[in-house]
Amino acid sequence: MHTAFTPNVKTSDIVVIGGGAAGMMAALFAAQEGARVTLLEKNEKLGKKIYITGKGRCNVTNQCDVDTFLQNVPRNPRFLYSALRLMNPDDLLSLLESYGCETKVERGRRAFPVSDKASDVTRALEKALRQMNVQVLLNTEVKGLVQDENGICAVETNKGSMPCKAVIVCTGGVSYPSTGSTGDGYLFAEKMGLKVTDRKPSLVGILTKETWPMQLQGLTLKNVCLTGTCCGKIIYSELGEMLFTHFGVSGPLVIELSSHLPDKGETVFFLDLKPGLTMEQLDQRLQREIKAAGKKQVSSILQTLLPQRMAVVFADICKIDSTRVCSQLTGKERTLMVQLLKKLPLTVKGTRPIAEAIVTRGGMDVKEIAPGTMAAKKMPNLFFAGEVMDVDAHTGGYNLQIAFSTGALAGKSAAKLIKDRNE
Ligand SMILES: Cc1cc2nc3c(=O)[nH]c(=O)nc-3n(C[C@H](O)[C@H](O)[C@H](O)COP(=O)(O)OP(=O)(O)OC[C@H]3O[C@@H](n4cnc5c(N)ncnc54)[C@H](O)[C@@H]3O)c2cc1C
């Protein structure tokens, strides 16, 4: 026997589990179609993860066309066509603006609230939910789904059982669990006999086999080129910024590279510390510097090419004593320096844990979900949206847009299902 909610809680047609980006949008779109909707969130407030996105500024989307968008989704991009057709980046920005969150587009087509405050995104969505009469129940944790011969018929929560005609699971992944995403949706799916793929971290710092990066902890390199390779193939190559840490490497280039890491095979990446110069140009420059340096130490010429802290470490990597006199450097040693300045290898040992990842790779198997509706193929009144599904993308606003677009489609489809069943 299940306890009922307190009398002031209304029953709904559709229950949305999880008040993140996907859940808020799902609830909004279902309500816009005329359905009675309840949004259940276990935290004390909505959008806890949104609050920390984009370093508190929320890179809400990437204002690009759908083809460009899908090129930034390394796994299962085609699954997202219908969702993006319903709500593309421009539609999302218009929606946010219509509820009072003005937006701006920065470098790389990244869109942010004009205020640079992530909380304004959540505030706009909360306003929309209020206007559409969505019942929002905070501090309400869903413990399980109840099934009868018609599919899902209720959800069990810490506050009682809530009957419904359809459920949308928007519980997120397992990264940054302190925001509420603790993987509950996977358990709901598995209990319903649906397949969930292995979860791995994506957009995360990388551990290296080499230990020298740890000596440079805290050092940022700007305008370097990072090229990732696996089994002789280039998997990634970008120019930008990276950071050395106590575990290996991080920073924008590395975070991005992590979403390209293949499931199998050793990944080695090469750091071009002087991408503006060819090997020949760099060699000529080094020859000039050595000539001019004369009796100065090797570290002094390396400091003209690299940050001071890195100069000594780099000499060690080249197995050259940095206190040696420049004029004693052999041609072979100079060539080695040039080669390593252009192609310094780093071998991937692993990644930081999933709890520290920006996004979860893997999740609810998209083969189990109809891409045109977001409903489970085996259970038509059970819908999924957002990071709980096995879709993840590069940095740049794509992950939030995926959550918003799949949420919109799930909400609209769930409302349509209820309407069709009532007729
Ligand atoms: C540090 C960081 C920065 C990021 N920056 C960006 C960025 O700038 N741009 C971008 O596009 N993406 C960014 N992302 C990724 C993006 O935030 C997520 O992909 C997106 O928020 C996923 O939305 P979601 O609604 O699917 O899941 P979540 O936002 O994780 O929402 C899930 C919600 O469900 C609730 N919930 C879970 N289980 C239950 C339950 N049993 N009962 C009730 N409620 C439950 C949780 O409390 C949570 O509120 C960032 C991620 C992190 C961690």
Image: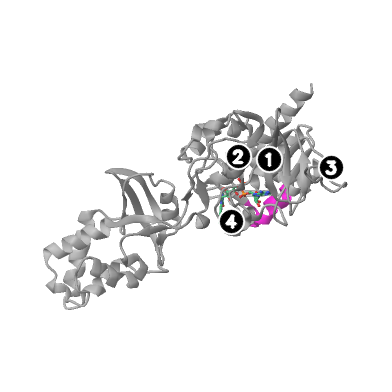
The magenta region covers: 113-125
- Going from N to C along the chain, the mark reached first, 2 or 1, is 1
* Gap between marks 2 and 4 measured at Cα: 21 Å
Q: Residues within 10 Å of mark 4 (few under 14, many from 20)?
A: some
Q: Is residue 237 visible?
A: yes
The reply to whether the magenta stretch includes residue 311 is: no
Above or below, 326 against 128 in this view is below
Task: For marks 1 and 3, give the one nearer the viewer.
Answer: 1
> Looking at the image, which residue is at 49% across and 54% down?
354
| Tag 4: amino acid | Pro
Task: For marks 1 and 4, give the one nearer the viewer.
Answer: 1
What residue would you read off at disc 4?
A: 177
What residue would you read off at disc 3?
A: 10
**Residue 281 marker:** none
- Going from N to C along the chain, the mark reached first, 2 or 4, is 4
Q: Quadrant of residue 338?
A: bottom left
| Tag 2: amino acid | Lys
What residue would you read off at disc 1?
A: 145
Q: Quadrant of residue 348?
A: bottom left
Identify the element where label 3 is drawn.
loop
| Tag 3: amino acid | Lys
* Residue projecting furthest to the right: 7
| Tag 1: amino acid | Leu
Q: Residues within 10 Å of mark 1 (few under 14, many from 20)?
A: many
Q: Residues within 10 Å of mark 2 (few under 14, many from 20)?
A: few
* Gap between marks 3 and 2 measured at Cα: 27 Å
Main SS, magenta region, reads: helix
Is residue 85 rendered to the left or right of residue 351? Answer: right
